[in-house]
Image (cartoon, rainbow, N blue to C red):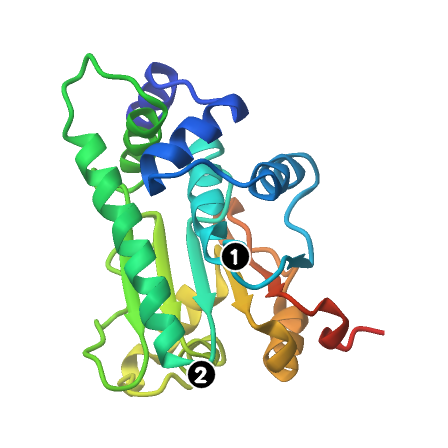
Amino acid sequence: MEALERAFAENPLTLEDFPGFFLEATGHEPYPWQEALLRRVVREGWPEAVAVPTGAGKTMVLAVALFLMALDPKAHRQVVYVVNRRLVVDQAHEVALGLKERLEEALARPSGEATPLVRAARRLAALGGGKPLEVVRLRGGVPRPRPTLQDPARPAVVLATVDMAGSRLLFRGYGVPRGLLPVEGALFGTDALYLLDEAHLEAPFLATLEAVAGLPGPWGRPGVRAVALTATPEGLGRG
């Protein structure tokens, strides 16, 4: 705990650092809606839905979530980005790997450097035992780690299809040995922020997430939070 407090004290981070962090992490400046989303989350918590047009950078909600992790140690440590198309899972996986690579490069810079990305990387690494981010892809046709995450305290991004994420959340993980079912259930049901892309096409899974959302996690950590990402919010079917 002392090491974590020291790392955070030596690498201060504020909301005003987000544009610089985003530029270093992605190569381009954030859209106004991405900055507005971060400020809203800090002020009010995650909204039920993020409704932006196709092509407006929904996948980069990942960068918003990562910055929030670095900003606030009480934020969700695990982001589960779910979309029911393998191709889109693969595309999001490449985005997440790019963020991981830039964080690792920033962490390796000389101690005298203190750009927003460097400070964020140091804070994330302090949360995760020296590594700023773990990235895992869960879909059919590719090898899967067992268990999914090596360290539940480490900041992580999991890119998954609906069946892979949902089966684990409900203790019935596809391809998971029987002895690991409760482990995977705990990983996917604790400290997990679900970003459900194309949510208007996955109303049953969104309803499942909302049914378990709000339950407190152990040891003072948050439980599940579900955020629908969609270009057509009217299709979510909420009454």
In the depicted structure, whether residue 219 falls above or below residue 239: above
In the depicted structure, whether residue 60 falls above or below residue 186: above
Kind of residue indicated by mark 1? Lys
List x then y, in percent, for residue 75.
Answer: 51, 42
List x then y, in percent, for residue 109.
Answer: 15, 25
Q: Residue furthest right?
A: 239
Mark 1 lies on residue: 58
The residue positioned 29% from the left and 33% from the top of the image is 121
List x then y, in percent, for residue 199.
Answer: 60, 73
Residue 100 visible within the image? yes
Kind of residue indicated by mark 2? Ser
Residue 129 visible within the image? no
Q: Position of 43 compared to 120: left or right?
A: right
Quick one: SS at disc 1?
helix
First-in-chain label (2 vs 1): 1
Mark 2 lies on residue: 167
The residue positioned 27% from the left and 36% from the top of the image is 125
Real-space CA distance between mark 2 and mark 1, rounded to the nearest whole angstrom: 24 Å
